[in-house]
Image: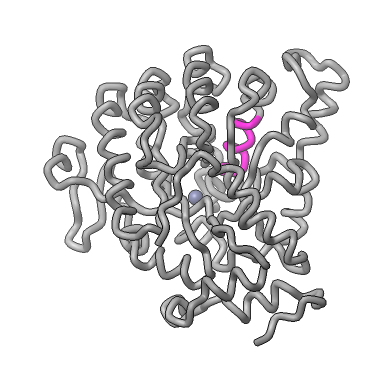
Amino acid sequence: MTFDQTSNTLVIVIQTTFGAPDANESAEAGGTTDAHSVIGSRGPIIDFHVHLAPSLSADVLTDLGVTKTSRGHYAFDGRVVEMDELYRPDVLGQFLAGWGTDHGCVSVPPPFYRQHLSVAEAAAWVPALNEGVRRACAGDARLLPLAYLPLEHPGLAVATAREHLGTEEFAGWTAAAGGNSCALEHPELDELWALLAADGRPLLLHPGKSPDLRLNKYYLDNLLGNPVETSVAAAELVFGGVLARHPHLLVILAHCGGVLPAVASRWQQGQNTARPGVNIPSGTVTELLHRIYVDCLAHEPAAMDLAEEVFGQDRLVLGTDWPFPMGLSDPYHAMKNRSGAFINKVAVENAARLLAHVPIRTR
Ligand SMILES: [Zn+2]
């Protein structure tokens, strides 16, 4: 199909040009070239939100309290992480290739956070986890690993960050928003924010498990808990003064910012009317929210439109949450009826700004 520059249905054209129900077929057909021609850019297209299980060294499994099932899935903490695709970097590579995406930033999914571990246990688990995600990505230059930071143990999070500062092993960082994480404005985390701000690589805040036991039904811990946990973390960054104190800190919120776009104006009203405890050191809520990046993982275009209003067009990036059912099989799903220039900004230009300090390996 030929791309029509004057078409108002660009995404439909994109989908039929390089969207790929069969990723293998599309990759073989050279999807990347088509994707770039459609959005008119030669810069790398980056998906900031994809997941893999870590490839843990067999030598350390027992010490970490992990076993492996006959199907090769990890079992720990009384559960098995069963999703086959999490153990298949090759399938992730095919998904990215099928959409013409040049790189995916790979993080471990929440079951691997294990935020209940003691600091001594986490001090063994987190390095193995980060080495494991690096190993999982090692065979495909499309895959850019993110280092996990255990925010429930601030000292260990700082030590983990220091271990990887200045290295080229990771494209950025990831950590649990909410869940069992320490409040992000906690003084013990301030050193971490200073380190990450100076480092220049982005931090993907991805929801941890909601502590609200009322949500243990109807899948609500995901459907409602995840968007709330993300927004709790954002509130701590904004109202706790973290963003004001660290103007160069680069944060990406998963899932289009959770419920935050819907409550942003309420937060601003709280500052406008000097509600108790609302005392941001500098800037307005609205200004500070424009500092935060979010992925475009929305299930309706209107949801992403609202996120664009709250965070700004310059703060949107691609994120699919592959391979989870709550993610997007089409990275451009929320961008129906958007222009090629808009999609290029999201998929390429904003991504390039976030990864300005990351040497991208070429394929
Ligand atoms: Zn995710």
Q: Position of residue 223 (x, y in %)?
A: 58, 50
Report if residue 210 is visible in the image: no
> Which residue is drawn at the image coordinates 68% and 42% (left, top)?
259
Q: Position of residue 150 (x, y in %)?
A: 40, 29
Closer to the camera in the image, 90 or 77: 90
- Residue 318 falls in image quadrant: bottom right
> Which residue is drawn at the image coordinates 53% and 16% (left, top)?
186
Closer to the camera in the image, 39 or 287: 39
In the rendered image of this protein, does residue 193 appear above or below residue 257?
A: above
Closer to the camera in the image, 250 or 286: 250
In reply to whether residue 227 is colored magenta, the answer given is yes
> Which residue is drawn at the image coordinates 35% and 27% (left, top)?
160
Q: Is residue 348 left or right of residue 126?
A: right
Q: Position of residue 269 (x, y in %)?
A: 85, 27
Q: Position of residue 356 (x, y in %)?
A: 55, 42
In the rendered image of this protein, does residue 327 appear above or below residue 280?
A: below
Q: Which residues are magenta?
A: 225-234
In the rendered image of this protein, does residue 15 appear above or below residue 296?
A: below
Report if residue 170 is visible in the image: yes
> Which residue is drawn at the image coordinates 36% and 35% (left, top)?
167
Q: Is residue 18 left or right of residue 169?
A: right
In reply to whether residue 92 is colored magenta, the answer given is no
In the rendered image of this protein, does residue 62 appear above or below residue 135?
A: above
For the rendered model, the colour scheme is one colour
Q: Is residue 32 left or right of residue 17?
A: left
| Screen quadrant of the C terminus | bottom left
